[in-house]
Image (cartoon, rainbow, N blue to C red):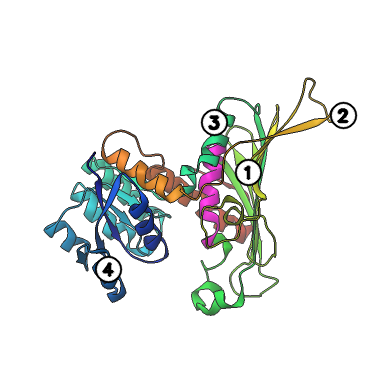
Amino acid sequence: MKKKIKISVVGIGLMGSQHLKAISISKKAKLHSIVDINHKSKLIAKKLRVPFYKTSNDLIKNNKPDAVIVATPNQFHEKHTISFLNAKIPVLLEKPISSNIKKAQKIINSSKKNKTHLLIGYHRRHNSIVSNVKKKIQTGKIGKIVAGNVMCWLYKNKQWFNEKWRIKKGGGPLGINLVHDIDLICYLLGPVDYVQASSSNKIRKYKVEDTAIVNFSFRSGALCTLSVSDTIVAPWSYELTAGENPAYPITNQSAYYIGGTKGSIQFPNLKNWYNKGERSWWKPIYHKDMNIRLSRYTLINQINHLCDVVNGKAKPKVTGEDGLQSLKIFAAILKSSKSGKKIKLN
């Protein structure tokens, strides 16, 4: 039997808990330890029969793992991640890479300086559905990409807003729901040249937005519109369509639509649309359902990929530079949503 990669999880919140489950299922990984300041996490470590540490330095000094997953709040990403990279321990860092661009660059520089792998936790890239769409685009099956449309419509109930930070700056759908969509649309359609955004808080009238529209202009010439709202009762958002997280009901709809000169594709309810023979709006249009089952194994796939990177069998699918670029795009979106102006990406 091949040796399993020993992984420590730092921060046992919502995502940290999901990573614990994924590690327990993975055939390539083994839980090494838990790092957290919370007493409840100490009880979890005891239950799972693994060592518990209060700080990353305690872990590094006493018992170095093969890799770590950093799932702490954003403001602590720089401190924890750099301490592990300096110790030559590969890091899977939960998204976003950091709370600001300057800190993100420091993290990336540390990875390069220490020649130690840094992976960013945009787990959707590890979904077999997304991999298939990427392949269709790369091989030219749907022609030259012309446009895309992304929907993230959902309704957050009253209890969600009991946490007061969710009605203040950063607590709206732009800050909470948009990050994965930014990474995924860039992964599929390439580098972004410009963004333009507008937002509204007319429904709940909190200080933070409840609805926003973002227009992307890609270097390839493709255009894309992303519509996000947390005040619409609807089945069209990635979480409700991909089946990745059992906490959400599956609607069997799609949230992404990408159109090219030879056809179009929608997913996660994966269909490829095309004409037979002549391409014309006057000709019948057909669709082919792709034979890919909904993936509930995306986080496990991500853990397995981390193990392959540590073993030298793969290169990181989502790099620190990818995380930095998403952060820059997000900053441009926020700037544009305030001014309404078109913002060019560096």
In space, the residues marked 2 and 4 are separated at their CA atoms by 64 Å
Mark 3 lies on residue: 135
Q: Quadrant of the N terminus?
A: top left
Check disc 4 and report the residue beneath it.
Answer: 47
The residues colored magenta run: 175-192
Residue situated in front as seen by the camera: 177 or 175: 177
Residue found at the far right of this picture: 282
Residue type highlighted by circle 3:
Lys
- Disc nearer the start of the sequence (3/1): 3
**Contact check, label 2 and label 4, Cβ < 8 Å:** no
Marks 3 and 4, the one that precedes in the sequence: 4
Give the spatial CA distance, label 3 vs label 2: 29 Å
Q: Within 10 angstroms of label 2, few (less than 14), some, or many (20 or more) residues?
A: few
Mark 1 = which residue? 267
Give me the C-alpha separation between circle 4 and circle 1. 39 Å
CB contact under 8 Å: marks 3 and 2? no
Amino acid tagged 1:
Phe
Earlier residue among tags 3 and 2: 3
In three-dimensional space, the C-alpha distance between marks 3 and 1, rounded to whole angstroms, equals: 13 Å
Residue at horizontal 57%, vertical 61%?
A: 248
Q: Which of pointers 2 and 4 lies earlier in the amino acid sequence? A: 4
Q: Which residue is mark 2?
A: 282
Q: Earlier in the sequence, mark 1 or mark 2?
A: 1
Which of label 3 and label 4 is nearer to you?
Answer: 4
Of 58 and 23, nearer the camera is: 23
Residue drawn at (66%, 74%), measured in percent from left and top? 204
- Foreground: disc 4 or disc 1: 4
